[in-house]
Amino acid sequence: MSVRVVLDKPRSLYTNLDFVAGRAILSLTSNETITAITVKLEGESKSRLLGEAFNPYGSYPGAYRRGREPSTIETEVHKILYKASTVFPSDGQQLASRASAYTLPAGLHEFPFQFKLPFNNACADAQSTYVNVAGLQVQAPGNTDRHVRKTLPPSLHGFNEQAIIRYYVKATVQRSAFYKENYRSEFAFQFFPIEPPRPPLPSPDQRRESYARIEHAFAPAAVPSATGKLPGLFRKASVPEPASPTGNPLLVCIDARLPDPAILTCNEPLPLRIMVTKLNDSSSTVFLQLLQIELVAKTAVRAHHLSRVNLTSTVVISKSNLKMRLTEQKRVMEIDKGHWRDAPLPNSVAPSFDTCNISRSYDLHVKVGLLHGSGDHIFPELIVETLVMPTQVYSGIAPPDALLRAMAGRSTSNVVPAPAVSNFTPHPPPSAAPFSPSAPPTSFPQHPSAAPFQTGQTHPEGPFPDDAPPSYEDAVADGIGPVDGPRGVYLQQQEQGSSGNAPGSAGKS
């Protein structure tokens, strides 16, 4: 006897509003009496953290180690998706016969099923459930400290199994005899959510930008002498060498800019602008020497009283030894977007999400290295500044037009006119700068002559609407079909396919 799950027209990537349809195929070598066959669509968010061991005798060298207690492992499991359907017996069979068990003949038996993937997780609505962990029935928390009702998170695997989000279809054959084990089979699949509703595209004169900014003053440097050589320690000169030139040292401001709100899209290039602005009348030339863009993911994991934040970095581009001259005639110089135009986000990047025990957020790190010089001569001083911009990452799976129209019909009563936008001033006075504090500067050492790191948004003075954008929970999506559009590629270490054709642990699940 065996059971397996086969999906009809399986996809490499499933998303909200998709139908997960297939068959539970039961193979019997002899007549078998069973109670029911249940197929479930499940998603679980599992966190597993190792706590610190406690030693009452202290942690200094030579402490008595026999008193050391073992480290504790905390595991927290949330059922973020749970739908069940009894495929056997059918409603008609239950009405025709009130028997508690049914005998099936030997051979192959197929039982079709179909589920529709919802938008939001259902953890807050679920009661205490049991999950199969290493062959044991472990009770999942039905009332923990925190439940989140938001869009279903993407499939996730990594961090030495500290954080796992998985989706699967499970078929269970319940046998009538209490001493006989139930048979189970699972089919895991990858899930990628539909992106949240994006704000409408503003007109060019109403465009706003989020930015990170830092200033730097180069040290004064000596200009080559008339002979083209600098004064040497062991070189005797009959003619006195000219002294270092007098004048203002070069003061520059480096900006990294994204459209506001700062949103990046999976499998798409960055809508990034990097600008270098001269803040004084120095005649020095600015050269771009180094450019690196990386996306830093912060995955917060919680398991009951334990918590941890894992940092992972994805390098988008990394270029060095460029010695690229920036335009001299302009005070505001924009770095060519061709450096990152053909470098989309890798397909291993998951969108931002927040669920009961696992959340993911992102920071974009832009590292810029500049040189300065006089004419074609480049001074050896190299400054490297890192700009950090908090950003969101969207999946790139656009919602259906019917869903957007349904949401627009519900939000017409809450329309707020867009504010007017003033022109951007490259170096506003401190009293008018709409800056907000950034991450602690100790994380990214800066040059002693660098100004404090600043982030903010370019927008005019005046009130802004505080209403959050509408969520898909506000729209009725029962009558809306699946997404018909590009879905991209999403690569994770999670295995896909059917597993568990052997008997599971005794009990009902």
Image: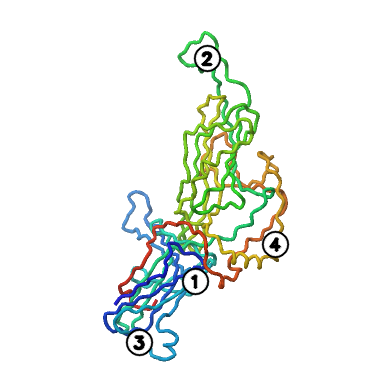
Q: Nearer the viewer, residue 242 or 210?
A: 210
Residue 222 horizontal/vertical position (percent): 55, 22
Give the distance between the C-alpha atoms of the residues marked 3 and 1, in whole angstroms. Answer: 29 Å
Task: Mark 3 or mark 1: name the one nearer the start of the chain.
Answer: 3
Task: Mark 3 or mark 4: name the one nearer the start of the chain.
Answer: 3
The type of residue carrying mark 3 is Tyr
Task: Mark 2 or mark 4: name the one nearer the start of the chain.
Answer: 2
The type of residue carrying mark 4 is Val
Do tag 2 and tag 1 residues touch (Cβ < 8 Å)? no
Do tag 1 and tag 4 residues touch (Cβ < 8 Å)? no
Task: Mark 2 or mark 3: name the one nearer the start of the chain.
Answer: 3
Identity of the residue drawn at 37% across and 55% down: 57
In the rendered image, which residue does mark 4 sit on? 415
Residue 350 horizontal/vertical position (percent): 48, 56
In the rendered image, which residue does mark 2 sit on? 227
Which numbered tag is attached to residue 116?
1
Which quadrant holds the C terminus? bottom left
Which quadrant holds the N terminus? bottom left
